[in-house]
Amino acid sequence: MTLLFQGRRFRVETVSQSTMSGETREREVVRHPGAVTILPLLDDGRICLIRNFRASVNKTLIELPAGTLDPHEDPEQTAKRELTEETGYSAASFELLCAFYLSPGILDERMHLYLATGLTPGQPAREEVELIENLLLPFDEALALIDRGEIEDAKTIVGLLRYDRTRRHA
Amino acid sequence: MTLLFQGRRFRVETVSQSTMSGETREREVVRHPGAVTILPLLDDGRICLIRNFRASVNKTLIELPAGTLDPHEDPEQTAKRELTEETGYSAASFELLCAFYLSPGILDERMHLYLATGLTPGQPAREEVELIENLLLPFDEALALIDRGEIEDAKTIVGLLRYDRTRRHA
């Protein structure tokens, strides 16, 4: 393993991989500490999405709130922190629904999805660099945004459709 | 914009972002050419997934076939090429279902999801470094793998749940 680039939020390393014929090849991968995303479900059935400007794609995306794990942080702790920082809401209960890899061909980032319920509104504590606003929608309207291609963020599509499936089978 | 790292499959650059107070901050982003993933639906209702060893997470994941765009390549062309290379199947028809960003906080990779129908089996042309085998499953069994947490790849969860929604509303 060779360190190729050390950034503030991720690093790039080589990793060895065996080929079909038993040789070894080097492959470049982005190492990331992992992340959480939160599905904040209000008592009235609405969910709290955010509009989030993303410099990487120069576009405001409609997303679930989310954030990166601090070193050695328990993902549920990250979920609590990021939900309040980004939306202002605090939640009485967090339930882990699933975890998934975002782009495992080049990136090891693993995303934990939490359902947050028992929500109480409050003041967000957004970072200076975060251009975020809340978007409260009935759950079925959020699903309609997926159908119309207006939600273009993978973790958000996974979060909404995965919970919709749980809900329909409950 | 400053180039920080040039790899074989992606590069790292800085991008400028305005803060709430109007200042400018630099942010590191991974630049990727974009990708496709394919939902190969057989005439008998089964789908063709793959078991794919991923060096980045040191694990074999169950995924939809997928691949990276060549420079200036039309995504549908990439879908045709990658479906046959990875699974052996060729398809009579490709339909774009949606497109989404995988990890827009750090990565600009945009993934195009195609439904492939009219499938004919053939010989795969896997790369030396690809450790892949086909996994043919009835669609509902693939959904059950999501419920049980055995599918952990975001594009695959999006592809299956997104198409399931289309199918149920057709």
Image (cartoon, coloured by chain):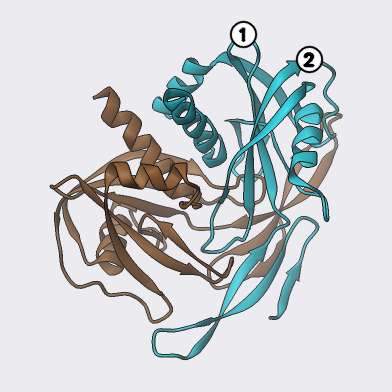
Chain colours: A brown, B cyan
Q: Quadrant of residue A1?
A: bottom right
Specify whether residue B7 is in view.
Answer: yes
Please state, as top left, top right, bottom left or bottom right, where the N terminus of chain B lies in the image.
bottom right
Position of residue B35 in the picture relative to residue B164 (left or right): right
Position of residue A98 in the picture relative to residue A134 (left or right): right
Residue B47: x %, y % from top left: 61, 19
Q: Which residue is painted at 54% across and 56% down in the image?
A: B103
Chain identity of mark 1: B
Q: The disc labelled 2 sits on which kind of residue?
A: Pro
Residue B79: x %, y % from top left: 74, 37
* Residue position marked by numbered label 2 in the rendering: B121
Q: The disc labelled 1 sits on which kind of residue?
A: Asp
Check disc 2 and report its element: helix, strand or loop: loop
* Residue position marked by numbered label 1 in the rendering: B44
Residue A159: x %, y % from top left: 38, 43
Q: Which residue is painted at 54% across and 73% down in the image?
A: A8
User: Do dots 2 and 1 share one subunit?
Assistant: yes
Of residues B149 and B161, which is closer to you in this image?
Answer: B161
Classify mark 2: residues with Cα within 10 Å, few (<14), some (14-19) or many (20+): few
Q: Quadrant of residue A97?
A: top left
Q: Which residue is painted at 75% across and 40% down in the image?
A: B76
Position of residue B97 in the picture relative to residue B170 (left or right): right
